[in-house]
Each structure stands twice: as structure tokens, then as C-alpha cells.
Image: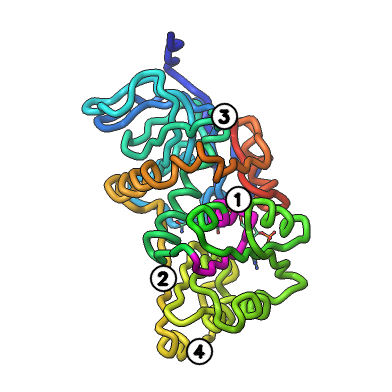
């Protein structure tokens, strides 16, 4: 039996652009699911770097996005909108969202929901959709990473990084990952990387060239940008691909483009949040078909670093901005 749905709920509002203290609990109505949506009673909601930028007023919000942050959640389907046939009341799902995850209840498009993977706790599943969708669409849809290729991921212990290490390994690539401490490097190896590079003490260009006998790597997933761009172009092998999911160290740099022409490189990138429901649904469908079966085979592990009560979203943001975390930070209503 599902419990009654209350009229009001606690959400986390951004009172004004600023620090983590701007994240404050507030009362809001529980939404009704529109056509094509389900209402989820949230068990866990992932915290993402984009939420910090949104809080600071530095995130270009897509039109129509709600003001409440939160790009993903997990929980129980408690109400079903018109035209939804793939989910039933009581189903346990995790969902990719355009916002509203920092809530007790949220409506999400039914097509952006996935079942909670076998053996994964309902709360932990709330940290899966955003990184898995991002890695899938960039590493596999855009860069077409193939078994046997060599793949470098920057920021190996970010939510994105650990997901990328695990998926690239699961699909047969050799993986190099960078991180800022030796402890983080050990975590990269533990999640399956073949080589971990402490970027504060080691040079990823040198190590990448050595690992490939001078040939270079086939694909790089980058979130750093800035002065990483020239050595990344240099490190790529012929037909190599470089894909940006963020440019944390800056988007303007002086770089020699000759390697792009000489080595037939592809430089690309993308954002997930502004995509429409159809595009997100296609990524979710691909994950369901090609990736979700891997959970049961033991090829993937969850990587929750810490859970915070929803009302302490500020504490969760402080931890994310300290960069001490390895893996996902979750909010639990
Ligand atoms: N485009 C998209 O659709 C999309 C979707 C989701 C996320 N993203 C982006 O992907 C990034 C990761 O997101 P997240 O939520 O997983 O964040 P996160 O867990 O906070 O990760 C950020 C990571 O960046 C690392 N880092 C910082 N400077 C670095 C450097 N110079 N070299 C290597 N690593 C460095 C930090 O690790 P160290 O302590 O090791 O430096 C940290 O692990 C964010 O920038 C986010 O905005 C983009």
C-alpha cells in the first residue's frame, strides 16, 4: 500500500545567488504529474557540479527549467500521468531530470526513468542517471569508443570520472585516469583504471605516450580545458577524439590546431541538461539496453561517497566544492 501523498513538501530553494548557505529548506506544493510524467517519492537525489554553478547564479539555465536544483533522483512511483504505460504505482525507479531533484516529491518524464538496477539500494540509485547518461552520450555516442582502444579520462574520481572508468573498462577499452591526490589515484585503480596519474606530480602527456609506445591515446573525456587543451591535442593518436563535458580551467587558450589536421582528430563536446525529452529518452533507452544488464554481471559498482539529509544540502555543496569526495554525494529526504 502506498502512503497518502501530502499536499505540501520540503524542497531546497536557492534564496539568492551565493554560497552553500543560500540553499534553504522551504515548503512547496507536491506537483501533479503532467501527461507523460510520473510522480516520484524521492529516496535519494544526486548532487552534481552543475548544481553548485546554478546556486552561484553561474549556470545558463535552459528555458523552462525549474528553480529547484537537482538533475537526478531515485524513488517510488506514487502517481502516474496520462498516457504513461511503462511504469506502475510502486515501481522503484531512478530518473534523469532537468531540475527539482532537491525535493521530497518530483515529477519526471516517464521516458527519462530507468529501473533501479539489481542489487543496488534505492537511495544509491539516485546518483546514477546523470553521470551514466553523460558518459554514454559523450564517450560512446560522440567518441564511439571501441574495445581495445586507449581512453583517458580527466577528473577520474568525479562522479563522471568513475562512471567513465567503469563503462570504458566494461566495453573493453584500456583506461588512463587523472586525479589530484595519491588516494584518489588508488581509487581510480580500484574502479578499474589501468593507469592512474596524479596530475599534481605527474605529466599525463608523458605517461600517456609511454603507455601507448608513442602512438597516443584514442579518446579523451575532458572536464578541465584551459591549459590541458594543447597537451591533449598532442597526446591523441591518429583519428583520436577529444570531448569536453566542462571547461573548469577556462575555455580560452592559445593552441596549435595543426595536430587536428595532421592526425585527423575530432574535437567535440556536449551538454545534457538543455536537451529535450526525446533526446534524453533515447539516451535512457540506450542505457537500459546496453548498460543496465552489466549491473547484474558485476561489471559495475556504485560509488556513493557520502549521504546528507536533504535539509543539509548546504553541507553537501561544501563537500563537493572542497573536492575531497571520491564519487557521488547524495541527498536523502
Ligand atoms: N556536459 C555535460 O552534459 C555534463 C554533465 C554532467 C557533468 N558535467 C561536468 O562534469 C564535471 C564533473 O562533474 P561531477 O558532478 O562528477 O563533479 P565532481 O565530482 O565535483 O568532479 C569534479 C572533479 O574535477 C577534478 N579536477 C579539478 N581540476 C582538475 C584537473 N586540473 N585535472 C584533473 N581533474 C581535475 C576534481 O578532482 P581532483 O581533486 O582530483 O582535482 C573533481 O574530481 C563537472 O565539471 C560538471 O559540470 C557535464
Residue under pointer 3:
121
What residue is disc 1 on? 18
Task: Report, in whole angstroms, how far the alpha carbon at label 4 lies from the one at label 3.
Answer: 48 Å
Nearer-N-terminus badge (1/2): 1
Residue placed under numbered mark 2 in the picture: 268
Q: Could you tell me which quadrant the N terminus lies in?
A: top left
**Location of residue 98 in the rendering, given as x and y in whole percent from the top left corner:** 40, 44
Q: Secondary structure at mark 3?
A: loop
The segment highlighted magenta reads 148-165
- Residue 305, quarter of the rendered image: top right
Q: Nearer the viewer, residue 27 or 321?
A: 321
Is the residue indicated by label 4 positioned so its CB lies within 8 Å of ligand 1? Answer: no
Sooner in the amino-acid sequence: mark 2 or mark 3: 3
Of tags 2 and 3, the one toward the viewer is 3
Colour scheme used in the picture? Answer: rainbow
Instruction: Decide: is 201 above or below 322.
Output: below
Q: CA distance from mark 1 to mark 2?
A: 31 Å
The Cα atoms of the two marked residues, 2 and 3, are separated by 35 Å
Residue drawn at x 70%, y 76% is 203
Q: Position of residue 191 (x, y in %)?
A: 64, 51
Q: What residue appears at the point 62 percent right and 61 percent down from the top-left corner?
A: 155
Label 4 – label 2 distance at C-alpha: 16 Å
Measured along the vertical axis of the image, is residue 144 above or below residue 272? below
Front in this rendered view, residue 268 or 41: 268
Assess whether residue 162 is covered by the magenta stretch: yes
Reading the chain from its start, which is encountered first: label 4 or label 1? 1
Query: What element does badge 1 sit on?
Result: loop
> Is residue 143 shown to the viewer in this render?
yes
Q: Which residue is mark 4?
A: 256
Amino acid at each position: 500500500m502506498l502512503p497518502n501523498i501530502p499536499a505540501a513538501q520540503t524542497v531546497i530553494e536557492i534564496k539568492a545567488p551565493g554560497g552553500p548557505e543560500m540553499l534553504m529548506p522551504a515548503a512547496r506544493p507536491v506537483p501533479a504529474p503532467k501527461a507523460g510524467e510520473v510522480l516520484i517519492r524521492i529516496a535519494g537525489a544526486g548532487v552534481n557540479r552543475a548544481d553548485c554553478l546554478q546556486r552561484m547564479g553561474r549556470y545558463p539555465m535552459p528555458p523552462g527549467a525549474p528553480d529547484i536544483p537537482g538533475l537526478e533522483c531515485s524513488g517510488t512511483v506514487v502517481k502516474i500521468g496520462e498516457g504513461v504505460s511503462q511504469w506502475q504505482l510502486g515501481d522503484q525507479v531512478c530518473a534523469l531530470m532537468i531540475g527539482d531533484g532537491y525535493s521530497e516529491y518530483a515529477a519526471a518524464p516517464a521516458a527519462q526513468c530507468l529501473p533501479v538496477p539489481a542489487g543496488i539500494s534505492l537511495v544509491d540509485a539516485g546518483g546514477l542517471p546523470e553521470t551514466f547518461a553523460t558518459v554514454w552520450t559523450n564517450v560512446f555516442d560522440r567518441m564511439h569508443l571501441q574495445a581495445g582502444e586507449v581512453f583517458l579520462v580527466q577528473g577520474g574520481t568525479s562522479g563522471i570520472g568513475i562512471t567513465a572508468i567503469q563503462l570504458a573498462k566494461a566495453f573493453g577499452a584500456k583506461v588512463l585516469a587523472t586525479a589530484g591526490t595519491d588516494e584518489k589515484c588508488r581509487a581510480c585503480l580500484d574502479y578499474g583504471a589501468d593507469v592512474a596519474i596524479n596530475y599534481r606530480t605527474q605529466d599525463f602527456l608523458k605517461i600517456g605516450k609511454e603507455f601507448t609506445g608513442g602512438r597516443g591515446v584514442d579518446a579523451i573525456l575532458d572536464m578541465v580545458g584551459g591549459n590541458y587543451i594543447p597537451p591533449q591535442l598532442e597526446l591523441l593518436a591518429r583519428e583520436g577524439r577529444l570531448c569536453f563535458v566542462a571547461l573548469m580551467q577556462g575555455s580560452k587558450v592559445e593552441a596549435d590546431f595543426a595536430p587536428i589536421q595532421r592526425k585527423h582528430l575530432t574535437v567535440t563536446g556536449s551538454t545534457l541538461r538543455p536537451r529535450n525529452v526525446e533526446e534524453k529518452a533515447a539516451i535512457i533507452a540506450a542505457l537500459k539496453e546496453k548498460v543496465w544488464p552489466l549491473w547484474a554481471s558485476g561489471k559495475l559498482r556504485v560509488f556513493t561517497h557520502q549521504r546528507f539529509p536533504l535539509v543539509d544540502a548546504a553541507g553537501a555543496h561544501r563537500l563537493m566544492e572542497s573536492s575531497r569526495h571520491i564519487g557521488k554525494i547524495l541527498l536523502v529526504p
